[in-house]
């Protein structure tokens, strides 16, 4: 392994140490509705994001709150001995992708059938400490 490759590998390893992610697969909410909630917390501090999700009236907020708590737990697992309050955690990335679509038929007039598409989504949430952003830039 060359020196340049080794240095890049060490940088990537250090960056992965501060980042933590969680994924939610096949969530039975349409991606459009989930993106509305995801946009509320993107770039926010973790405690503020939890408050936003806890007091939001949208159904998707409950699922996203649980996912955020999972990402925080994953971060704690990686960084044992470091307190969350000192590390200044931020929701760095949230993206919502479309998942499988269940196709159903609803009876329509004159013997026809209209197709109903029940959409679902995949959500990926990345949590990172704000201190590492300053160091990396």
Image (cartoon, grey):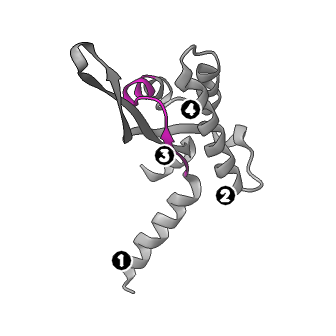
User: Do callouts 2 and 4 mark residues in contact (Cβ within 8 Å)?
Assistant: no
- The label on residue 64 is 4
Quarter the N terminus occupies: bottom left
Disc 3 to disc 1, C-alpha distance: 22 Å
In front: mark 4 or mark 3? 4
Tell me which numbered mark, 3 or 1, is placed earlier along the sequence: 1
- The label on residue 4 is 1
User: Do callouts 3 and 1 mark residues in contact (Cβ within 8 Å)?
Assistant: no
Q: Position of residue 101 (x, y in %)?
A: 36, 38
Per the image, label 1 sits on a secondary structure element best described as helix
Tell me which numbered mark, 3 or 2, is placed earlier along the sequence: 2
Which of these two is toward me, 32 or 54?
A: 32
Q: Is residue 7 above or below residue 42?
A: below
Which of these two is toward me, 42 or 112?
A: 112
Q: Is residue 121 above or below residue 137?
A: above
Q: Is residue 1 visible?
A: yes
Disc 3 to disc 2, C-alpha distance: 17 Å
Magenta part of the chain: 20-36
Disc 1 to disc 4, C-alpha distance: 39 Å
- The label on residue 133 is 3
Which residue position holds label 2? 78
Tell me which numbered mark, 2 or 1, is placed earlier along the sequence: 1
Residue lying furthest front in this view? Answer: 111
């Amino acid at each position: 392994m060359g020196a340049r490759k080794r240095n890049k590998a060490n940088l990537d390893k250090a960056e992965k140490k501060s980042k933590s992610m969680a994924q939610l697969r096949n969530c039975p909410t349409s991606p459009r509705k989930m993106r509305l909630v995801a946009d509320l917390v993107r770039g926010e501090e973790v405690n503020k994001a939890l408050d936003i999700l806890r007091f939001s009236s949208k159904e998707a907020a409950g699922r996203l709150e649980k996912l955020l708590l999972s990402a925080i737990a994953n971060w704690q697992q990686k960084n044992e001995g470091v307190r969350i309050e000192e590390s200044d955690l931020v929701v760095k990335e949230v993206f919502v992708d479309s998942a499988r679509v269940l196709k159903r038929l609803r009876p329509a007039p004159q013997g026809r059938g209209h197709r109903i598409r029940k959409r679902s989504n995949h959500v990926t949430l990345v949590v990172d400490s704000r201190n590492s952003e300053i160091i990396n830039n």
